[in-house]
Image (spheres, rainbow, N blue to C red):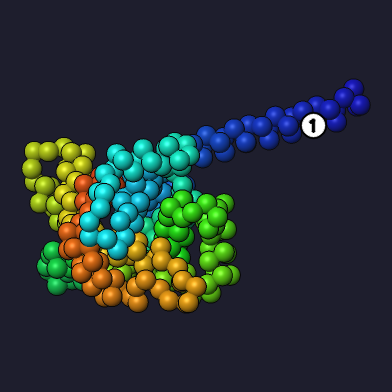
Amino acid sequence: MSTSNPFKQAAEAARKKTSEAMDATKRLATDSPAVKNDLLHTPFMRGALPFINGGLAGMAATTVIQPIDMIKVRLQLAGEGARTGPKPSPLSVTREIIAAGKVMDLYTGLSAGLLRQAVYTTARLGFFDTFMKALTVRAQEKGNKIGFAERAGAGLSAGGLAAMIGNPADLALIRMQSDGLKPAAERKQYRSVFHALKSIAKSEGVGALWAGAAPTVVRAMALNFGQLAFFSEAKQQLKDTSLSPRTQTLTASAVAGFFASFFSLPFDFVKTRLQKQQRAADGTLPYKGMSDCFRKVAKEEGLLRFYRGFSTYYVRIAPHAMVTLIVADWLGFITK
C-alpha cells in the first residue's frame, strides 16, 4: 500500500495540472478579445499598424497587377527619340514578350515590385494615415471637420516622403523590366532585386540608386494627391448614399484610380525614361534631368507621347489602387 501512494500522488498531481491547463485554455479562448486588445492596442502597435497594413495591401495588389506594369513600362520605352514610326499597343507588346520568352516573363521584376511595395506603400499609406489622424485631432479640437485641402496636403506629403525612401527599389524594377529590350550581349540578366541593386551600386555608384528621384517624388505626390485625397473625399461624399459600404469603397477607389492616373502619368513617363538610361561610352546620358527629359520628349516625340498608354496605365493604376485601398480598409477594420 505504501509503495502505491507515490503513484497515486503523481497521478493526482498530473490530473490537477491537466485540469489547470484546460481551464487556462478555456480562459484564453474566452478572453481572446482582451488578448487581441492588449496586443493591437499597445502604443507601438497602434503606430506601426498603418504601415504594416499599407505594405501588405500594396504587395497583394502588385502581385495581381505586375504583368500590366511590365507592359506599361515597355510601352513607355518604345520609340524613344522618334516622333514617327510604329505605334505599339498593349496587345502587340504582350505578344512580343511572350514570343521572346514565356508567359512568366510578364512577371519580370516581381521581386523588385514587392520590395518597392514593402518600402514605398508601407511608408505612403502609413504616413497618410498618421497625418490624417493628427489632422483629425487638430480639427476636432477646433470644432471643425477635415476638408479636401487637408486630405490633399496629407496625400502629397506622404507620397513625397515615401518616394524618396522607395526610389532604389523602383529603379531596380525599371532596370529589370527594360533589360529584355537590350541586345542579348548587353543584358545584365538580373536574378533578383537584390542582385540588381548590388550590380547598379557596384557599376554606377550608390548614388545611382536615386536616379530619377525628382520625377519619382513628383509622380508619387501627384499619384497620392489623385488617389488618397480623392478616395478619402469620395468616401466622405458617398457616406450618406444608399450604396452599401463595399460598393462605396469600390466606387471611391475607381474614382481615385482615374485621377491618380491623370495627374501622375506624365511624371511616371519621365521617371521611366530617366531610370532606364545608362551612360554611353563617352560618359554622357540621354537626359540631363527631369526638365531636360520633358523638353526633349516634347520636341522630338510630341506632347501626346507623355500620355501614351493611358488606358494601360489606368488599368494598372485603378485596379492597383482598388486592391490596395480595399485590402488596407479590410486590414484596418480587423485590426482596429
Q: Nearer the viewer, residue 128 or 64?
A: 64
The answer to whether 23 appears left or right of 104 in the picture is right
Q: Which residue is mark 1?
A: 10
Q: Nearer the viewer, residue 106 or 238?
A: 106
Q: Looking at the image, how many numbered discs can be counted on the residues? A: 1
Q: From the viewer's perspective, is residue 264 above or below residue 14?
A: below
**Tag 1, which secondary structure?**
helix
Question: Residue 85 location, x and y as percent?
Answer: 25, 53
The answer to whether 62 appears left or right of 23 in the picture is left
Q: Which quadrant is the N terminus positioned in?
A: top right
The answer to whether 133 appears left or right of 141 in the picture is right
The answer to whether 43 appears left or right of 198 in the picture is left
Query: Would residue 293 be seen by someone viewing this image from the given angle?
Result: yes
Residue for point 41% across, 42% down: 97
Q: Residue placed farthest to the top in the image?
A: 1
Q: From the viewer's perspective, is residue 42 above or below residue 63?
A: below
Question: Residue 25 location, x and y as percent?
Answer: 56, 36
Q: Nearer the viewer, residue 1 or 242?
A: 242
Query: Would residue 130 be seen by someone viewing this image from the given angle?
Result: no
Residue for point 28% across, 75% down: 292
Q: Amino acid at mark 1?
A: Ala
Q: From the viewer's perspective, is residue 334 above or below residue 46?
A: above
Residue for point 57% across, 64% down: 198
Q: Nearer the viewer, residue 234 or 210?
A: 210
Question: Residue 241 location, x and y as percent?
Answer: 8, 43
Q: Residue placed farthest to the left in the image?
A: 241
Question: Residue 77 location, x and y as percent?
Answer: 34, 56
How many residues crowd mark 1 within 10 Å: few (<14), some (14–19), many (20+)? few
